[in-house]
Amino acid sequence: FGAGYAGFAAALSHHRAGRRTLLIERHAALLSESSWAFATATGDSTDPLWCEWQQRLACHRPVEARRHDGGIVEVLATDLVSTEKLPLLYFAAPFSAALDADGLLAAVTLATKSGPLVVRARQWIDATDRGELATLVASAWRAPVPEAQVLTLFFRHPRALSHTTATLQTPDGLPLTWEPSGWANEHTLSIRL
């Protein structure tokens, strides 16, 4: 469940290992951290799947290698799902769970555009940011709240801009960062909340 980077990587790894896999996404947004959330900054990893993904993006990314263009990320992820024949179910939200005799998750009923759909599995991965499966199984469980969040605004100009980076503060002391996005005519303003 969840087709962000963690869910996408888990589903692709299981699928490539020959396991029957279904990637389920509430919205139609593969790798939503980059596409819908506009979180373009990336980290480093030596994981082979991450390295493969970086190579795939290499000829489609902005100048700065540590940033991903959300639209490009989503298109390339969709192409990879199609090429790998990874089963994917969009617009499906879990709304009830069935436990087996040992108290383990055995089935999840999904709300889909076609009506309720029951999915049964021996193994489940909840890679949603809110722990959608976890809250169905243990109603008292709550997803951890991050200590801080970053709001990023994108500004595009008809001409190229300088590659100046500046760090300022709001009157309340919140840090603001103005920096190039990697595209010659785009800057971002990030606010750490």
Image (spheres, rainbow, N blue to C red):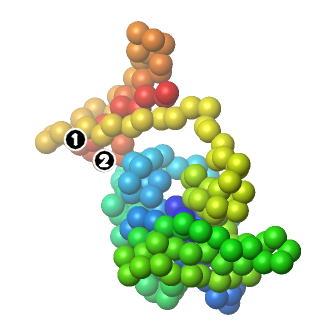
Residue lying at 48% horizontally and 35% vertically, measured from the top left: 150
* Residue 156 marker: 1
Q: Earlier in the sequence, mark 2 or mark 1?
A: 1
Q: Nearer the viewer, residue 96 or 134?
A: 96
Q: Percent position (x, y) of residue 154? A: 30, 40
Residue lying at 43% horizontally and 75% vertically, measured from the top left: 112
* Residue 183 marker: 2
**Image quarter (top left, top right, bottom left or bottom right) of the N terminus:** bottom right
Q: Are marks 2 and 1 in contact (CB under 8 Å)?
A: yes
Find numbered disc 2 in the image and state the secondary structure of the residue it sits on.
Answer: loop
Mark 1 closeness class: few <14, some 14–19, many ≥20 residues within 10 Å: some
Is 124 placed left or right of 73 in the picture?
A: right
Residue lying at 57% horizontally and 32% vertically, measured from the top left: 148
Eye-nearest disc, 2 or 1: 1
Find numbered disc 1 in the image and state the secondary structure of the residue it sits on.
Answer: strand
Q: Percent position (x, y) of residue 191? A: 43, 28
Give the spatial CA distance, label 2 vs label 1. Answer: 9 Å
Q: Nearer the viewer, residue 164 or 146?
A: 146
